[in-house]
Image: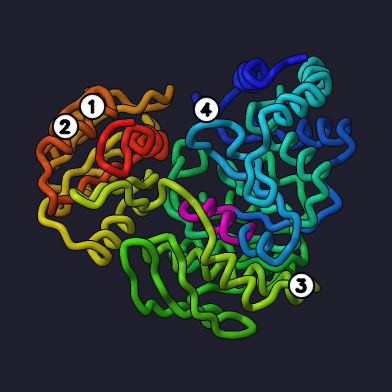
Amino acid sequence: MLNYTQSTVYIESLTNYEKSPAARYDASNFDLRRMELLLAALGNPQAGRKTIHIAGTKGKGSTAAMVASILRTAGYCSGLFTSPHLYSWQERIRINGRPVAQKDFARLVNLARPHVEETNKSARFGCLTTFEVLTAIAFLYFQEQGAAFQVLETGMGGRLDATNVVKPDVCVLTSVSLDHTQVLGDTLAKIAREKAGIIKPGCSVVSAPQATAAGSVIKAKCRALDATLIQAGKAIKWIPIGNNLTSQTFRVDGLLRKYLIRLPLLGDFQMENASLAIAAIEILQQQGANVTYKDILRGLGGVRWPARMQILGLSPLVIIDGAHNPYSVKRLVESIRKYFTYSRAYVIFGSSIDKDITGMGSELEGFADRVILTSSRHSRAAPVDYLQKLLQNSNLNIWHELDAVKSLSAALAIANERDLILAAGSLFLAAEIQMAFSESGKFV
């Protein structure tokens, strides 16, 4: 029997596209039939509970966390499956907000392992990946814990994603922008087509405001499948009221009523995500879920989702965020300018090698007084010299620091108490900075 450490080693020994992206996003690399074979061998644990399925480029993890928090507050046993993780595999699989225990993770890996190896041995539809096995383990855990609801965030895309084996009660499509372009396609329409692949016949679909190219694809998909489309920004609206360093207050005009929300997550984009979560919950209410107005308010008021415009220190102001494409960096910069007052802005920047690094650098121009290029320990992290090569013709004042933790030390050494230090470009970088920084601004 594998213990927890051994089970994580086993999981990582499988094909892991998070470490090395697939050359092609097609059935030769992502064939859902092998996922269906594994789940059938496990007794189809994905079935038997209400499902909220969430895809998109920006905000899908935050939206999933909000939906799960509301359902938990309403008294329902709810499962949450997200990716990637900040520190451990356990974070990806949660029941009622609690990560799966190490002993349960190991036990589920041991339970699934013979079926994984049998599926891979036949290789009829290719070999199972790390993410696919994690998804199956999540379904098993939700089933044995008696979850009434499961909230699922797609890993990448949607159409061929391992989570796309469910029959959702509600689909949510967060903002679609250019990301994973080498895999999902180089236009918004192509990427939206992959994201909209989670839509099933007759289901209810909640969509964030989308660029015309992406919105047209989503509308056409809903028409083709007779799915009901609810568009945020039209059927659901939000109006900002105020904010401080720990929360923001806003009104949401939902499908069923108006809500006055206090959310402990900052950023204009989080108001949008909260509105999507409320719409999804309202649809579930119409389907019979017993969720009250106070459950929605308390659920959103108690949501936790780290490394998303998260404040680590106040003097200087130290913020981390997982923004990892030009659109998300643009929204992050806009929100920081709106929410905070500071003198100079120092940006610690690191990125995965397959991202639009030049585009993110462009969004930092005019915002960052200095950019410290660095690299996280993740296998996909772009080396500092590669970042320098791509950004050398930008209008950025660039420094270098090979080690992410030392880059924070360098920023703290030059920043005064009125300045801002922002670490962004990669969720992996944000996690490393978070681990290194304590409330007093010292290393832990």
Q: Secondary structure at mark 4?
A: loop
Q: How is the image coloured?
A: rainbow
Q: Which residue is mark 2?
A: 410
Residue 3 image position (x, y, % from top left) = 70, 17
As for residue 61 lying within the magenta part, the answer is yes
| Disc 3 packing (10 Å; few <14; some 14–19; many ≥20) | some
Q: Quadrant of the N terminus?
A: top right
| Disc 4 packing (10 Å; few <14; some 14–19; many ≥20) | few
Amino acid carrying label 3: it is Asn
What separation in Å lies between label 4 and label 3 (alpha carbons)? 45 Å
Residue 257 image position (x, y, % from top left) = 60, 85
Q: Earlier in the sequence, mark 4 or mark 1?
A: 4
Residue stretch rendered in magenta on the structure: 55-68
Q: Earlier in the sequence, mark 2 or mark 4?
A: 4
Q: Residue at x 23, y 34 (%)?
A: 408
Residue 379 image position (x, y, % from top left) = 43, 22
Can residue 124 be seen from the camera position used here? no
Q: Which residue is mark 4?
A: 23
